[in-house]
Amino acid sequence: MSRVALIDDHESVRLGLEAACARDGAQTVVFSGSTVVSYLDWRSATSEPSADVVVLDLTLGDGTTVTENVRSLVDDGASVVIHSVADRPAAVREALAAGAAGVVSKSSALDDVLDAIGTVADGEPLNNVEWASAVDGDRDFADAQLSARERDVLRLYAAGLPLKAVAERLGVAYSTAKENITRIRVKYVEVGRPAPTKVDLLRRAMEDGIVAPDGTPSAH
């Protein structure tokens, strides 16, 4: 039996999923709450093992971001299924990039949600329509439209060089390289793919083929 945690700031959604899991019998709900922090606090206080699957609302009302919520849960050892409306492709794409196992729409039948939980609990990929449409439909929107110089700066910086070394390698002033990084971050925020840290920038660079999957600068 799979151990499931439900994180959604709408209690009615959680109650509906709890009832469905209880009726199905293949999953047991070990936690139900409105924030990722409350789940992690529960884990710490009870020493309970991580849930096998966390069903997570895409946008919570506590000011947290999609990326930090998904990463916190994945780093804690759970697989994450995003349960949300399907009209925010950029945020869905961000969740998948952060490590979510898949997406299931809140408009889906409860049996479909239970099937998605079971699939992920079994370690299988969740190749559903919501996932595919969110990624495919967001390709143009998600393109940060970096200039050639910005791509060069990101390629070297994300691959591990200090910003001063990046500036020296490209023959530009340190202030210019720093300004480029700032503009790159702004552009990624504008397309719904924020990159506040250097690790985030590396992830975006890998997603866009600017840096190779092993973290080294791409040849092109």
Image (cartoon, rainbow, N blue to C red):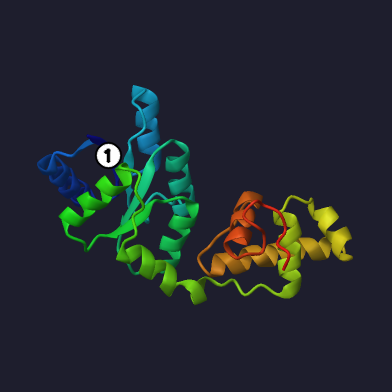
Residue at 33% in and 25% down: 48
Helix, strand or loop at mark 1: strand
Residue at 59% in and 55% down: 203
- In percent of width and height, residue 120 lies at 32, 47
Task: State which quadrant residue 127 falls in.
Answer: bottom left
The quarter of the rendered structure image containing the C terminus is bottom right
Residue 122, placed above or below residue 102: above
- Horizontal side of 154 relative to 144 (left or right) equals right
Residue at 40% in and 34% down: 40
- In percent of width and height, residue 186 lies at 62, 66
Residue at 55% in and 69% down: 190
Task: State which quadrant residue 218 falls in.
Answer: bottom right
Check disc 1 and give the amino acid type. Answer: Val
- Horizontal side of 3 relative to 96 (left or right) equals left
- In percent of width and height, residue 191 lies at 53, 69
The quarter of the rendered structure image containing the N terminus is top left
Residue 6, placed above or below residue 116: above
Q: Badge 1: few (under 14), some or many (20 or more) residues near its Cα, within 10 Å? A: many
Foreground: 128 or 146?
128
- Horizontal side of 41 relative to 9 (left or right) equals right
Count of numbered circles in the view: 1
Residue 29, placed above or below residue 69: above
Foreground: 162 or 113?
113
Q: Residue furthest left?
A: 23
- In percent of width and height, residue 216 lies at 71, 54
- Horizontal side of 116 relative to 25 (left or right) equals right
| Residue 30 visible in the shown view | no
| Residue 113 visible in the shown view | yes
In the rendered image, which residue does mark 1 sit on? 4
